[in-house]
Amino acid sequence: MSRTSINWDKVIGKKARGLDNADLGEVQEVLRGIVVTEKGLEDRNKFYFPQTLVDQFDGNTLLFHVSRIEAEAYRYS
């Protein structure tokens, strides 16, 4: 499924993964051009990824073209 055919309402609550299966948390919301994910139970981290980094959505997992290290640039603390 290409990025343009993703039903963005259906990604809420789904897993977010990056390159090499990097855990990017769970999708919390989709804003204008931004996908917000949250990771962690006690130390929660929020990430604000541009939709342009999304590779695909398989119905269960939203896959981003970003490594674990690159994801840190999108983390909000």
Image (cartoon, rainbow, N blue to C red):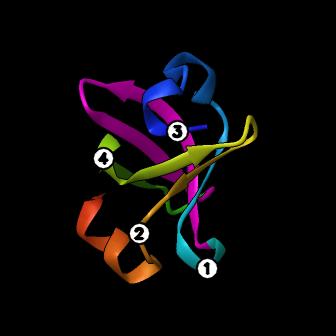
- Please name whichever residue, 43 or 60, is drawn nearer the observer in this view of the structure: 60
- According to the picture, the residue beneath numbered tag 1 turns out to be 20
What residue type is disc 2 on? Val
Based on the picture, tell me whether residue 35 belongs to the magenta stretch: yes
Residue bearing the label numbered 4: 52
Q: Amino acid at mark 1?
A: Asp
User: Could you tell me the amino acid type at mark 4?
Assistant: Thr
The reply to whether residue 16 is visible in this rendering is yes
Image spot of residue 27 (x, y percent):
54, 39
Q: Quadrant of residue 23?
A: bottom right
Q: Earlier in the sequence, mark 2 or mark 3?
A: 3
The verdict on residue 37 being magenta is: yes
Indicate the amino acid at tag 3: Ser
State which region is magenta: 22-41
Tell me the CA gap for discs 1 and 2: 9 Å
Q: Report how far apart the C-alphas of labels 4 and 2 lie in the structure.
A: 11 Å
- Label pair 2/3, CB-CB below 8 angstroms: no
Residue picked out by circle 2: 66
- Nearer the observer: mark 2 or 3; the answer is 3
